[in-house]
Amino acid sequence: MTKTVTKAGLLSRRRLLTTASAGAVLAASPFRINLLQAEEAPIKIGFPVPLTGPYGAEAQDQVRAGQLAVAQFNDAGGLNGRKAELVVRDDKLNPGEAATRTLELVEKEKVNFVVGSLSAAVQLAINNVTKERGIIFNSISQSDAINEAADFSKYTFHEALNPHMTSGAVGRYAFPKFGKKIAFLTADYAYGHEMVRGFLEVGKEFNIENLGDIRHPLGTTDFSTLLPRLQALKPDILCISNFGRDQQIVLKQATDFGVKKSIQIIAPLLSHASRVAAGAQAFEGVVGGCSFYWGIEDKFASTKAFNDAFRKMYDGKLPTDYGALGYGGVRTVLEAVKSAGTVDTEKVIAALEALKYDYYKGPQYYRKCDHQSVQSVLVIKSKSKDMKNESDVFEVLSTEEPSEKNLRTCEALGHKS
Amino acid sequence: MAGLSFDLIALQLFAGLALGAIYVLFAIGLSLIFGMLTVVNFAHGAFYMVGAYVGLYLISLGGNFWLCLVAVPLLIGLFGMAVERVLIRPLYGRGIDYPLLLTFGLSYVMVECVRIAFGKTGYPFDTPEVLQGAVDIGVGYFPLYRLFVIGATAVVLLVLWLFLEKTSFGLIVRAGARDPQIVRVLGVDVSRVWLIVFGIGTAIAGFAGLLAAPLQGVIPEMGGTILAEAFVVTVVGGMGSIGGAVLAGLLVGVVVSMTSLFAPEMAKVSIFALMAIVLIVRPQGFFGRAGLLS
């Protein structure tokens, strides 16, 4: 008898603890569901990004700037008073997780649009879900595959640069300047593979010699066993195609190994958040590409306006490259909603296709056949002195102006033109 | 790829040993705690991470790296002792899975606390100036700091060995690991011994974290990846065997390094393949005592 009582007591206490802690987790969660529904449901934009994991620093900036675009839309009165809302989810840099979260965003949250992702591979998983459900997805992460006919759908938009454009711009700058013998160190997944393909493609124009491509898994923390091999190849240029924390660590360790003494390191993309997280020493002298740098504000009024708005919302902080993409990705969708006057998918697609915009980095537009945003690519170099503020980390070496000739042709992508 | 020379292979072997030294340093703390207390400390990676953050914090307050080499293990050791006293001690005698689950949960709490206190993004951790740059080791250039890490690991191992084998307290520790009951009957306060052993184990973890910081920077999740590798090292070496951890750590480093040379994409898998092979041939690992887990 006593035993049963104890057992029941224990059980109910456990139950209570579980319920209470579940409640506490829900209440503390930054993504809690708004229980009080407004009279008219808000325009919901699902935003799956890898908040945890090696790309976390960049993903947080995407969210910050995405929130800014939503706030600006709402402050300007929304869609005839109808407000927008960003529904953020952590995709943990995992395609399966991303697909589940996206499905949840579509089914449970009933989002009108999806913007987000930060991985060449994960975005394809998101795109699979959205294209099947007929929801517009604006990807803010690099990928070549998403432009190709096999993955593309009319619901798919791509605000970010793609590897072909990025590696093209960096290669056209670096190969004539630093030499023809190139060794590659590459993150072993879609992003790295597409970047290397892009470099080899543009390298044909300059007759580069490919000394070899060493691949490392995503999330590597020690490159000491790969660097001696790369140094022994004696390249003019070491091209390192990885991202986020991988990039921070490899550049730090390459510096320690003295790679920079005789070899120029280039990277398709130099991430602003990673440069800040890894410090000046690791990135010193490295040349790479980017889609946005706040410093182009003396060139474009839109950049100045974006920087100022971001500064105001986030205590004087300046936006980063991936932050700008979060902003651009959300803002283009909301502007299209405004000009269409509705959230109806077909009408918003038409409005997006018709958009000629300059929201943060100079003129851009979505190419009709693959919905790739045609835009400029900046070639930058990491700075280690004469910095005006904590965000003053890069120097813009050259700018490749927006042009469809730097994209693969619609036919090459398998689209009927 | 062409260009395979003797020098490169020698350098690669050396890089493997250097990497192995880091594994060893991390795994001996884990192995010490398991061997003496039969506690599988899943929070070991979190102590390692906290060690790096404490170092970062002390340096930001104006301390230098050399001071941190002393202060960090002391602070983390004290923290570890507090954890043992408050959280782990009540679980002795309850089976191996209780402290395992507790430390597993604790590691999440620690990582989350660090995220709240220092933010989710990492911080740079510059290599101390005198240890920057690469030196010629005969077969090629190697970072001076990595040589320093090898030296530091050797010193820790030597001190630990002297402590366990040559001091009377070490004798009690070893006896306590064999048969705590008899030691208790002989009038030794075993719980005090365990407290100190746990403190030493976590202190080494903190020390390893501090040494790793200039290699890869500091981030809340840094303990996660190395924990998986360290478990491979302890399992291959034999759970609880410090000598086994040293041998296995170096071996894992060399295996990773040599696979990187010939098939870099297999490097990460290679250590698990090594573990599988060792476990098939010798289920208790190199120097493991059978039956420690039962």
Image (cartoon, coloured by chain):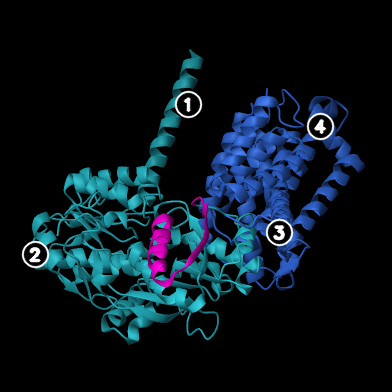
- Residue B119 disc label: none
Percent x, y for residue B14?
Answer: 73, 54
Q: Amino acid at mark 3?
A: Val
Tint applied to chain B in the drawing: blue
Q: CA distance from mark 3 to mark 1?
A: 41 Å
Query: Where does the magenta region start and end?
Result: A192-218
The quarter of the image holding the C terminus of chain A is: bottom left
Q: Tell me the crowding category of disc 3: few under 14, some 14 to 19, or many 20 or more residues within 10 angstroms, Cα based.
A: many
User: Circle 4 sits in a helix, a strand or a loop, which is it?
Assistant: helix
The residue shown at (48%, 79%) is: A177
* Magenta segment includes A208: yes
Q: Amino acid at mark 2?
A: Ala
- Residue B176 disc label: 4
Tint applied to chain A in the drawing: cyan
Name which quarter of the figure residue B276 lies in: top right
- Do we see residue A317 in this rendering? no
Q: Residue furthest front?
A: A207
Percent x, y for residue A259?
Answer: 62, 68
Q: CA distance from mark 1 to mark 4?
A: 35 Å
Q: Amino acid at mark 1?
A: Leu
Task: Name the residue tied to disc 3.
Answer: B72
- Residue A340 disc label: 2
Same chain assignment for discs 3 and 1? no
Same chain assignment for discs 2 and 3? no
